[in-house]
Amino acid sequence: MALPILLQPIDSQMLSEMGYLKSTQTLFVRFRNNGAVYAYLGVAPEHWHRLRATASVGRYMQRNILGQHRAVRISTGDKESAKVA
């Protein structure tokens, strides 16, 4: 599935890439541990700006995004796909 945006690489132990689609208030992230991409719905622009500015993306995600916004798995990720093949 093609994403509606390009994800930007980030320096985080939890995430390898992230992006935000303001028109739908959707945060897209790729997890570093398995390469899976998730969309988090209803993420206000303020969270996106704070997430980009924080010193710890993982900590911010755990405190403000995970479990507080509906998540949709977009892809299984490179590492999982390699296990199936």
Image (cartoon, grey):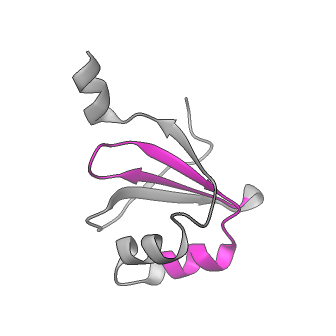
Name of the residue lying farthest toward the right:
23
Locate the N terminus by quadrant.
top right
| Residue 74 image offset from top left, x and y in percent | 53, 38
Residue 81, quarter of picture? top left
Please indicate whether residue 29 sits to the left or right of residue 27 in the image.
left
| Residue 71 image offset from top left, x and y in percent | 58, 51
The residue depicted at 33 percent of the width and 43 percent of the height is 35
Return the residue nearer the eye: 6 or 56.
Answer: 56
Residue 68, quarter of picture? bottom right
Please indicate whether residue 52 sits to the left or right of residue 32 in the image.
right
Locate the C terminus by quadrant.
top left
Magenta region, residue range = 25-51
State yes or no: residue 8 in magenta: no
Q: Is residue 56 above or below residue 7?
A: below
Name of the residue lying farthest toward the front:
67
Q: Is residue 26 above or below residue 53?
A: above
State yes or no: residue 27 in magenta: yes
